[in-house]
Image (tube, rainbow, N blue to C red):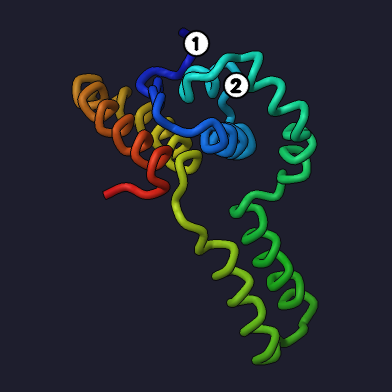
């Protein structure tokens, strides 16, 4: 199977609508392939491809190039540009910027965010302690499975 090591998740009890929603979220917010996502959610690649085409997921993904990180960076860049130009920020402007940063930064952790972080962490840890990395992967899989089925982890 071509799924990233440690991230094969079998979630057979999810309703088809839930699987479709999770598939879309994973497609839009991770670098996983349709094949990987289909395997994770136990749906056929053909089904996932139809969902993606019918829902124009590729178009949404292209439009969603502005990640949380890039949005926050844009806000900071705008503040820096004003400061460099000698402009002072009014209290109202400062409050607006702070609210914008908080709004962008305060989104809750979802399965796709967890998978992205886990992939980076696992790659980092494998270079330092392969045995521990292998042990942690099972916990990562359990955590992501809970996020996919419940929307939260306990």
Q: Earlier in the sequence, mark 2 or mark 1?
A: 1
Residue 112 place in picture, x, y as percent: 50, 39
Whole-Å distance between the Cαs marked 2 and 1? Answer: 9 Å
Check contact, mark 2 vs mark 1: CB within 8 A.
yes
103 or 142, which lies in front? 142
Q: Secondary structure at mark 2?
A: loop
Q: Nearer the viewer, residue 89 or 149?
A: 149
In the displayed structure image, the side of residue 62 where residue 129 appears, left or right: left
Which dot marks residue 33? 2
**Callout 1: SS:** loop
Q: Position of residue 56 (x, y in %)?
A: 78, 34
For image coordinates 73% across by 34% down, the residue present is 57
Q: Locate residue 150, reporting x and y percent.
A: 38, 45
Q: Residue at x 76, y 76 (%)?
A: 82
Left or right? Give the position of 55 relative to 115: right
Q: Spot the residue most to the top.
A: 1
State the residue at coordinates (55%, 70%).
102
The disc label shown at residue 2, or none: 1
**Dot 2: within a 10 Å radius of its alpha carbon, few (fewer than 14), some, or many (20 or more) residues?**
few
């Amino acid at each position: 199977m071509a799924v990233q090591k440690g991230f094969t998740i079998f979630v057979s009890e999810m309703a088809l609508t839930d699987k479709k929603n999770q598939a879309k979220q994973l497609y839009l917010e991770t670098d996983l392939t349709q094949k990987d996502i289909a395997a994770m959610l136990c749906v056929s690649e053909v089904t996932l491809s139809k969902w993606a085409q019918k829902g124009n997921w590729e178009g949404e993904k292209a439009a969603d190039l502005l990640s949380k990180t890039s949005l926050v960076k844009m806000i900071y860049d705008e503040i820096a540009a004003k400061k460099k130009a000698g402009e002072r920020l009014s209290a109202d402007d400062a409050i607006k910027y702070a609210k914008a940063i908080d709004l962008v930064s305060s989104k809750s952790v979802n399965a796709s965010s967890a998978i992205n972080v886990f992939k980076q962490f696992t790659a980092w840890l494998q270079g330092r302690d392969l045995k521990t990395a292998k042990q942690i992967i099972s916990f990562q899989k359990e955590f992501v499975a809970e996020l996919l089925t419940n929307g939260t982890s306990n």
